[in-house]
Amino acid sequence: VDPSRLGKIWKVDPMPGPSRQTAPRRPVAPLFDPNLAPEILDGPKRDWWQQGGKIVQALGVRPGSVVADIGAGSGYLLPFLSKAVGAKGMVIAEEIQLAFLPTLRGVGRDLGNVEVVFGSADDPKLTRRDVTLFTLLTVYHEVQNPVSFLKTLHRYATHDARLAIIDFDPERKGNPPPPQGHSVREKDVIREARAAGWGVSQRISFQYPHSQFFLIFKRL
């Protein structure tokens, strides 16, 4: 990845083992209203601040990979992931809200290498056990039982699988600002992930948006 174009990437110190402590409970955001998707998730301005292409490039997704987009919503990230994994790879678009499924299925048909899965709040119910990368784009703040859910992902992961979590932090300033009630502190995510057996391996920062963090985890 070219840091001059994608932003700075910080290598983190060697990861400690899984935490013996249970991450403390915190407020969890309500599920996003699918009726707002055309304006917020699919609007023309989103590429300007979300930079989906740069996200996937920074992740270094390889052709032939199996990637699971958890909480795929209306499928914003799918075209970028689909192109990266190529014809021999697969993208699993997981979603727990029925209202999003028709749109996701339409995107999947158009792309050809996307499978849509209807998961639950506790288990994404993926069809593969060889997932090399999980992506959670601005959805982690809605996960009801984060430690338990992140533990469940191990069931579907390869031994060297990675987990990417990108979300708004209420303590950050930036444009767009963190949506009220739909954000989570970076330090809480790190603590919860460690309790679930995932340790931070990279922190990535783009020029926009400063209001989001971008963390990549590996299995401990």
Image: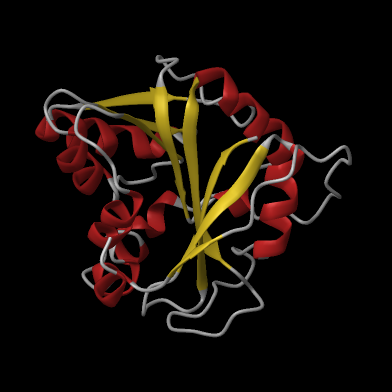
Q: Can the viewer see residue 63 in this picture? A: yes
The x and y percentages for residue 110 are 10, 34
Q: Is residue 80 above or below residue 213?
A: above
Q: Quadrant of residue 86?
A: top left
The x and y percentages for residue 73 are 39, 45
Q: How is the image coloured?
A: secondary structure
Q: Quadrant of residue 81?
A: top left
The quadrant of the image that shows the N terminus is: bottom left
Asked whether 10 or 47 is in front, the reply is 10
Q: Is residue 183 left or right of residue 50?
A: right
Residue occupying image coordinates x 52% and y 26%? 124
Q: Is residue 115 left or right of residue 179?
A: left
Count the numbered circles shown.
0
Residue occupying image coordinates x 51% and y 76%? 211
Q: Can the viewer see residue 28 in this picture? A: no
Q: Residue furthest front?
A: 14
Q: Quadrant of residue 66?
A: top left
Q: Is residue 149 above or below residue 139?
A: above
The x and y percentages for residue 9 are 43, 66
The quadrant of the image that shows the C terminus is: top right
Q: Is residue 166 left or right of residue 31?
A: left
The x and y percentages for residue 27 are 77, 56
